[in-house]
Image (tube, rainbow, N blue to C red):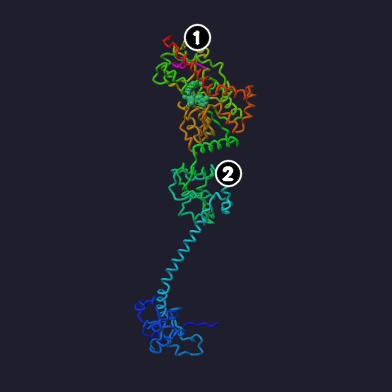
Amino acid sequence: MFAVSPKTNCPHIEKSNLLDLKEFKKIPFEELKCKKCDEKDELWICLICGESFCSRYKNKHFVEHNEENPEHCICLGVLDLSVWCYECINEKNSEDKSNEKGSYITSNITNQYIKIIENLKFGEEKKIEEKKNEEINDSEKKEKDENFIIKLDNKNEICSHVKEENIINKFNNSHDTYFKSIIKRQLSNENKSPNFFGGICLICEEKIHYYDDLDKHYNVQKHKLYFNLLDSTLVCMECKSQYYFDIIDDIKYRILFQYLSEINLNLPKNTKLLTKEEIYDEKYKKIINNFKNKKFSKILFMVGAGLSTSAGIPDFRSNTGLFKQLQDKYNLSSPEEFFFLPTFLKNPMYFYEFTKLFDLSKVEATISHKFMNFFVKKNIVKYVFTQNIDGLEKKAKIPDEKLIYAHGNFYNGHCPKCHKSIDINKINEGIQKGEICYCPKCNGPCKPNVVFYGENLPLRFFQKIQECHDIDLVIIMGTSLKVQPFANIPEVTNPNAFKIVFNMEKVGNYEYDILEDDSIFIKGKTDQNVIKFLKDIDLYDEFSEFIKEEYNEDLNKLIGKEKELINVNKNQENEDNKVEKLTEEIKNLDLNKNK
Ligand code: CNA
């Protein structure tokens, strides 16, 4: 193969009067052409005078230039940026193949000229090239970015690593808890909104700072999948793919976004949040599933007067409740005043007369009372805390050891002045006869052990509360949750337990409309709703069987009976009639009789 190797020891370079480098830089490179023939393609620049001439393969004008000016022997080829010495050509040894076409020379000096021409020649080209490259890069990047966005709704496009790690399945199968629990755990000790730019490694579930740590974590740990809290995307570090959850209408993803929005994390654009109804459905589904999967084993019931209204006992605070009637009748500043201890001590007959109106002997436990006992007998109830004093829990056969009377009961009596225990039969006798039963010790008026405002709650209430830190579900039924400390039981036991509130109206301070809050409000009459609930958790048949065995009753008939009562207008009429009758009787009480 023919090769030309440069000569490194050209003696003419040192002797030549080369053009000053500063002058050489001024060569108008873009206008370069042969001084003699305007040829532009194959040019030689004379390094002595700086003029350009065409090659020997064009019109040989540089050869001519050298012949005319022998001292102008060093030239630089614009085409290939090589430097030649014509002096050396003249001294050429025909044996020397390397010098066949003259003397191709190299030296530190000539290299400086080459660099200048190189810059002049390629500077612009380089810039153009770089610009071109940038454009190509940009469009490639853009193309890459477009490929980068692989949407989760197109499952076929998900990369193998996401599939390997089963992320989507994990998410789909436990979408309400998967990301939520990870995120919650990672943010647990902080303010809910993350003050870091980052996300969570879906392999080790570590919190990772996006800019500082993500690459490092990936390089060191080789964990590929990452959930970016900044834009709620799933990122595969290996494939450089990013899975966007936005624009997806799937409820599963919307649940995640709902949760993210509730803990103030960033939401992707166009995120559709859940409606209140969807939030309700999700929470309901969750509770139903937990029941079906036997996740609840320490249930706490909290009940109030609303549980017994279907048995014909009016509650306090409903529109048809006794409070309004009592307040109107006695011109009280507040309805509670009727049940103040000082009111009783001043005029015990108010209470004696009032109590006489309630013949509790014929009142029967409702479906809701039996619903509680059903779970007690299944051995998944920690305690039943009741505010009621009507004794219907006992009639529903809920065992004493499970029952906590927060506001006392009618089974025992005492003197509220000296606290002596009094035989309840004597008090009941007095109630029936309309004669106050006085304490044999201090002569104070005696009353059943029902707790009045201003009296302490039974010690057993506080003792049992202490045992309830492990409860997993609180079922709250028929109470306005207005009376403390009863209303606060969930908060002082286990605030993290699920809560189901069966009531006619929304009660309590729970955030029912928030997915993050594990409480659900089931509006309506408890007896109807517990039946629906039992059907939803697939325990209706078992309950029906239980009703037969435990109470020798037919559930269908019980429901029919309730339906009759509840049946829209009829029911309202029935209940209103009962309450009206009672109200009438209260109005007719002669309160001055025993003053
Ligand atoms: P409350 O303040 O009268 O509240 C009752 C709640 O039950 C209200 O929010 C009603 O909307 C709701 N309610 C009424 N009927 C139904 C129904 N069928 N289904 C669902 N919800 C219904 O009564 P609380 O128990 O909250 O108040 C505590 C007081 C009331 C306690 O000290 C009790 O002793 C007292 N109380 C007891 C009885 C009883 O023993 N049956 C009756 C009346 C009052």
Of all residues shown, which one is farthest toward the front?
A: 37
Residue placed under numbered mark 2 in the picture: 173
Q: Nearer the viewer, residue 138 or 363?
A: 138
Instruction: State the separation of the CA atoms marked 1 and 2.
Output: 66 Å
Q: Which residues are magenta?
A: 412-420
> Callout 2: few (<14), some (14-19), or many (20+) C-alpha neighbours within 10 Å?
few
Quarter holding the N terminus is: bottom right
Which residue corresponds to mark 1?
433
Whether residue 389 is visible: no
Main secondary structure along the magenta-highlighted residues: loop
Compared with 135, 202 (above or below) is above
**413 magenta-colored:** yes
Three-letter amino acid code at disc 2? Asn
Q: Position of residue 547 (x, y in %)?
A: 62, 25
Q: Which picture quadrant has residue 570?
A: top right
| Residue 482 forms part of the magenta stretch | no
Where's residue 65, x and y in %? 40, 87
Amino acid at the residue labelled 1: Lys
Circle 2 SS class: helix
Answer with the quarter of the image where residue 74 lies.
bottom left
